[in-house]
Amino acid sequence: MPSWLMSAVRTAVQAGWGALAAWLLTRGVHVPADAPPWLTAAALAVAAGAVTAVLRWLETRSWRPARRLGRVLMLGIVRQPAAYTARPEWTVGARR
């Protein structure tokens, strides 16, 4: 799988889990009808960020069940895409 496609799939899966978490949050929390629209957008952003942090945390644990749970939640795509790895020519202060 090309790294750009892997990155897109990982982003979509993480956003989907975040949207699901935000939707579940809105089911349990009463939001007034006159609440500003940015409040819903902010809740979605916070939920997506929290889910992404939890998924990355699970993927990096040395405890095998946590890594397996991270793999299941990320649909089996747990390796870091090559697009995000540091290349020597991209490091700070590197000469070209």
Image: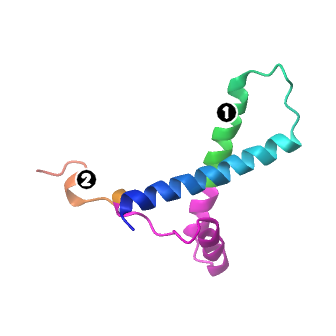
Residue 74 within the segment the image draws in magenta: yes
Residue under label 1 = 42
> Of helix, strand and loop, which one carries label 1?
helix
In the rendered image, residue 42, in percent from the top left (x then y), is placed at: 67, 33
Which amino acid does the dot numbered 2 rest on? Answer: Thr
Checking the image for residue 91, the label placed there is 2
Q: Compared to 68, does 87 lie above or below?
A: above
Which amino acid does the dot numbered 1 rest on? Answer: Ala
In the rendered image, residue 35, in percent from the top left (x then y), is placed at: 79, 22
Which residue appears at 62% of the width and 80% of the height? 64
The CA span between labels 1 and 2 is 34 Å
Q: Compared to 61, does 40 lie above or below?
A: above
Which residue appears at 39% of the width and 68% of the height? 1
Are the two marked residues, 1 and 2, in contact with CB atoms closer than 8 angstroms?
A: no
Task: Find the magenta span and give its range.
Answer: 53-82
Q: Compared to 94, does 39 lie above or below?
A: above
